[in-house]
Image (cartoon, helix red, strand yellow):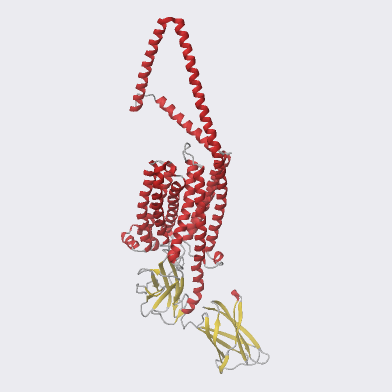
Amino acid sequence: MTQTIAPRLRTLVLLLLAAACALLAGAGPASAHAALTGSDPREGAVVDEAPAQVSLTFSESVSMDDDALRVLDPRGERVDDGKPSGTGGATYSVKLHAGLPDGTYTVTYQVVSADSHPVAGAYTFSVGAPSETSVAVSGQSAGGGFVGGLYGVGRYVSYTGFAVLVGGAAFVLACWPRGSGVRVLQRVVVSGWLALTAATLLLLLLRGSYTGSGKFADVFDLNLLGEVLQTKPGAALVSRLLLLAAAALFIAVLFGAYDKREDEEKRDLTFGLAVGGSVVAAGLAATWAMSEHASVGLQAGLAMPVDVVHLIAVATWLGGLTALLVALYRGPADTPVPALAVRRFSRVAFGSVIALVVTGTYQSWRQLGSWTAFTDTRYGQLLLVKIGLVAVLVGVAHFSRRWTAQLAEAAPAVAGAAAARRAEKRAGKASTKASAKASGTASAKASAKASGTASAKAGTKASGNAKVAQKASGTAKGTGTAKGSGGSPRAAQLARQRAAVDAARQKRQRDADPNRFGLRRSVLAEAGIAVVLLVVTTVLTQTEPGRTEEEAKAAGGSSAAASAPSTGAVTLDMPFDTGAQNGKGVVRVELDPARVGANDMHLYVERPDGTAFDLPEVKVALTQKAKSIGPLPVAPDHITTGHWSASGVQIPMAGDWEVAVTVRTSDIDQVTISKNTQIG
């Protein structure tokens, strides 16, 4: 049975790992957590005169250097003074050179959001009229490329190392104190510490290039590293390294002095280790909470401690699960994981799940803000995947608890049977010794009686000589073995073989327990799902929160409207012919400033020779077919000969609008003409 199911479990884990790799591969560079919500001049605008400066407004405050905001002319030359400054809130501007010629200009920006993620983008505006430009605005991204990929791997390894370090130590300290002497558990915890330390150093070296040029050569730039150390993420990484030094001391005590003490003495040391370990774990978790999502946005003062609790709960559950899995599969046969330790971990895991539900609910509300964000934003979609994985993981954990209960019930019977077998074995050995002694005594008496005194003396002497020889042989053998030479290699080999056979027999007896096998199988499934869950969690930390994304979308229209220049009027010339006498002419429609919100509309009617004339009736309707908006009727007022006007014409949404004009030249002759134009 074991041989049949084990390959299937391995296949399951391999599939889950493949899914995890696919998620990592599809994650791409970190999404922008600070979104561009407005600009002046706005994207695609055509202004009559060159502006004195370019301003950008983000959804949150950002940090930038002298090259963060650039304005390039059609040839790709910089036309800004290279010194961006904040003008209040999350708005930043850069001054332009005076006397810029007409043409299309490109604005590029690369900044770092308050939650440590890089943000990049580009757009164009034109002075006078659009022109050809040699600047390519496609592919503008931040945090991508080889350095971005390495940085993403470093983030994943750091989260994994933290979970294994904290969860493995908690499993030993709270669930199985005697496990501090188990070599495989020691390797698990130390491996978590090494992984987290190496990943932290890697992130610190990559940080400057990751948020800047993206070039691998900049990784070794000491000046850039010095700049990183002055930032909030850099300070968090340095703090993490200092806390890892304290964690190393904790590990040394846990697997050194703690392991060597007796059970009574361990109880006295457990409390101190628990307090010290909790402080170090909370400090490590805080290095993430103080530099990422929780540190900015709504209720940051409450969000950071909640995030610390959330991270510790994740680590305790998933890291402890890893330690349990390794102990079940790789632990020594003579030191199996007791049922009591599994029951204790089950209670710890249950408490961790409760903490995850409470803190996760708060985080979801804070990062999403609405129910629609679950399906309309990438963050919400990933969060739904995470919630589903947690639900599946809890379901699998239910089966683990069932196997744990059965293992606990079977433990007394197994222990009693083992004790009976040991007692029977001891009784058999005693009976054999007694029988041999009795047989030897009777034989000796018969031999002495038959052979006489002389024979007995000879036998005694020979026996004495044999004992002396045997003693000498034993002494020589022991001496040779101790010195590493002169002994019997064959005897040493036989001893090793017997030890290996005994270990294999004990492992077979341990694994033959159906309850323990069922527990191992369910814990393996839990660990496989946990791998994917950890990957999804890591990708979530690199994704723009749903609340920010929706706020940016909502602010995009109004911000663009507020920053639209007053000279962005639209003029449409539409010839008409109603088929009647004097039924030909041209209608000129002017919409100013042609943006979302209130606009002024003017209509001028001229004959083919250019003279103005009046019509019995002129009507206008606006329609955006893509959004099924309209037709929105406009009734302009007659001002003078050939001139009609309407003020406060509302354009509810930016996009491609159809402007339809109905012209009536007599009681029965009229025609409707239309043109499309981009508004907003």
| Residue 145 in view in this figure | yes
Residue 37 in picture, x, y percent from top left: 47, 73
Tag count: 0
Which residue is nearer to you in this view: 488 or 83? Answer: 488
Which quadrant of the rendered structure holds the N terminus?
A: top right
Residue found 42% across the figure and 79% down from its top: 102
Which residue is nearer to you in this view: 505 or 385? Answer: 505
Q: In the drawing, does residue 305 fall left or right of residue 626? A: left
Above or below, 55 relative to 372: below
Residue 397 in picture, x, y percent from top left: 55, 50
Residue 127 in picture, x, y percent from top left: 43, 79
Which residue is nearer to you in this view: 509 or 47? Answer: 509
Residue 538 in picture, x, y percent from top left: 47, 57
Residue at the far bottom: name it: 640
Above or below, 374 relative to 567: above
Above or below, 204 relative to 135: above
| Residue 607 in view in this figure | no
Residue found 34% across the figure and 61% down from its top: 229
